[in-house]
Amino acid sequence: MAIIIDGQRRVFTLQTKHTTYQMKADAKDVLLHTYYGEKTDSSDKSLLIFRADRGFSGNPYEVGKQDRTYSLDSLPQEYSSFGMGDYRITSLRVQNKDGSQAAELRYAGYRVEEGKYGIPGLPAVHAEHGEAETLVIRLADAYSGLEAELYYGILEEMDVITRAVKIINQGTGGVVLQKAASMNLDWEDGDFQWISFYGRHSMEMNFQRENIHHGIQAVGSVRGISSHQYNPFVILCEKGADETMGSCYGFSFVYSGEFLIEAEKDQLDRTRLVCGIHPDNFSWTLQSGDSLWLPEVIMTHSRDGMGNISRNFHRVIRENVCRGEWKKRRRPILVNNWEATYFNFTGEKLVDIAKQAKELGIELFAMDDGWFGNRNEDSSGLGDWFPNEKKLGCTLQELAERITKEGIQFGIWVEPEGISEDSDLYRKHPDWAVGIPGRKPCLSRCQWILDFSRKDVQDYIIGQISELLSGIPVSYVKWDCNRAICDKFSGMLDGGRQGEFSHRYVLGLYRVLEELTGKFPEILFESCSGGGGRLDVGMLYYMPQIWISDTTDAIERLSIQYGASFGYPVSAMGTHVSMVPNHQTGRVTSLSTRGCVAMAGTFGYELDISKLSQEEKDEIKEQIGRFKKYYNLIQNGDYYRLSSPLEGACTVWEIADPSGGEALVSAVYHHVQANPAPVRVKVQGLKDGADYQLVLDKGLKEKCPALPYGFGKGEVISGAALRQVGFVVPGAVDGFQAWQIYIKECEA
Ligand code: DGJ
């Protein structure tokens, strides 16, 4: 049983394989948070809450005269609200019909539901029959009639608990939600650090680890998209925690729009975490009887370090977030023409790339930006989803057929949320572009954004894109969005409701994606927002992979992919081998290094094949063969970070089969040194009692003049030795050298 309820004491304990979560409705009907961490029993942990009279932390009226130790400002709570004596960051701030900003949510009942709850119109973790249970706790404010239903989805085997909230106005008057977070989590103790991921366009997911200090620290987005700047994913951990040791908590917000994740260390050195929609661009009116679902948060805990946190997220995303045919199906190895041609191509050129790609074993050709409307540069054409037949030299259908006849699948790029000032769509529907009446909206990449909060716009896009995809043999769609959103305003919302725009935009986007991916289940959709502008679990519910950065430089990609690996699986990360000198950095790395780095993702190419030498073409054929050979291991195995790109000379990661029968270790020298020190790595996920051989693939082996002990000479090493002592990565022969070492259990 994942949910244990002590009805008499009103204690609710949620058990997963290795964790326990607990809350309790106390005698005043306040829902206390009593525990989250390493698995323990279901006894009432509220007995461990320490209370004292804290001056200037007031007491609810009903206890104020007898018990000054009872204060909402110091009690650990499950869902905190603003205005009634809790002065910390809170999860809910409302404006009542009398203008007051206060809510006093008290326990009002619970129910248990079979399976995992779903959220209408929003992405959420899903589960097979018997895989999950749901607990719903109802809180109510007697004064206003506002209710909050707290949803908990327990995926026992996955060590995952999800949270979501439904706010319902059961009162008689309107209420305005000014802040409505999806979760609150209080810790009674713990000297935590927090790990967050910051960045910018082309340099996303930089790892940052800081102490949680007194005051408030936060990451968030007010950009309409989850953003390149901060990812909606954080880890809280003990100070000494590392990849394999220490208590860690992971939180991923299942949402693709504006978010805020805040942590506060309070006057009593206790930590509170609040995660939800960013309140700066948010207000939502609930008339009597209205309700609003708030997006989901996925939580996991491990007492054994961050590696487990990541693997828990990888598993739950692969199995319980991604849906449809492409969840399990092998994804094609693709070539994309963006860095090969940018806007400068003809149909002939595309067919030529596709044809040559096919000869190398590439399975899909993806036609990127520039095929439609008047789109020969990025300042025009967005919105006109009609092929530029003059540029292509034929109809789109003819082009797609010519390419598929070569024996390679055809894919297409679209940016349905974008609109150019210079487009027929804008000339026809200027009011469909997001902007504030009377003001000139800010341009970004010379473009605007379509108002996806409007149903007529959503319907139009569903119609246009459906028509486009129905007319051609298409196997893949890259869904791009190349700007952040400002000038927020919708002509369909009245003045008092403009604060709903950002969330309504995301709901509109989700509706469009649900319709289109449902209508074309056989098409593989890849999400993109100028690379990682929308790298979030919300998008992965609709599209199983995301182009995580516009940087294709292999060495820069090491830290981007390292950061992304904390919260996202290999199967979700779009990764390509591109030309050198690299277009973003000018750096030259070997094809072998570029291949190795790209193999830590969905794997593909983004280059002009006609510019490659025969030797390079042969190497690409070998890479494709190698990737296919290890496909299942790479995409579905357990991921371990063995050495970070942020220190030392060599980045090393490992993907092991969950059975422990095989593993692939990839190592890339990111720092080229003279007379380098040996790089030793300790392998994880193998069986202590089994024997293994270390193998360098043909091609790689030939490149390595001096193989360290243990390689390729038939030596057998035990799993225990590989775990405890490890092995030395072959040295760097040329700059930024990469190695892939396959570890195979010896047959009995
Ligand atoms: C941004 C994407 O991230 C690139 O890969 C490419 O598709 C361009 N947009 C096209 O405009």
Image (cartoon, rainbow, N blue to C red):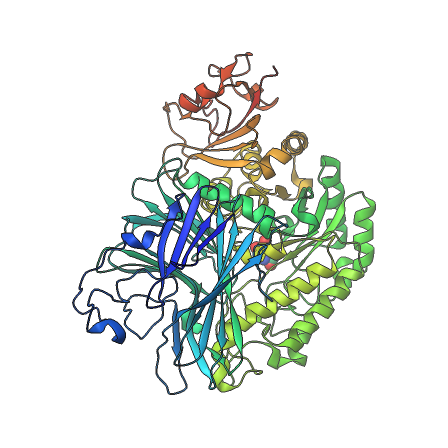
Q: Residue, x 63% and y 50% (percent of image)?
A: 128
Do we see residue 586 in this rendering?
Answer: no
Residue 742 vs 393, above or below: the answer is: above
Do we see residue 149 in this rendering?
Answer: yes
Residue 208 vs 634, above or below: the answer is: below
Q: Position of residue 505 (x, y in %)?
A: 56, 71
In the image, farthest residue toward the front: 8
Q: Position of residue 439 (x, y in %)?
A: 49, 83
Apparent side of residue 218 relative to residue 51 in the rendered image (left or right): right
Residue 680 vs 546, above or below: the answer is: above
Q: Quadrant of ligand 1?
A: bottom right
Apparent side of residue 587 relative to residue 335 in the rendered image (left or right): left
Observer-nearest of 623 and 215 = 215
Q: Position of residue 602 (x, y in %)?
A: 61, 43
Q: Position of residue 99 (x, y in %)?
A: 37, 86
Residue 584 vs 61, above or below: the answer is: above
Q: Residue, x 24% and y 58% (percent of image)?
A: 214
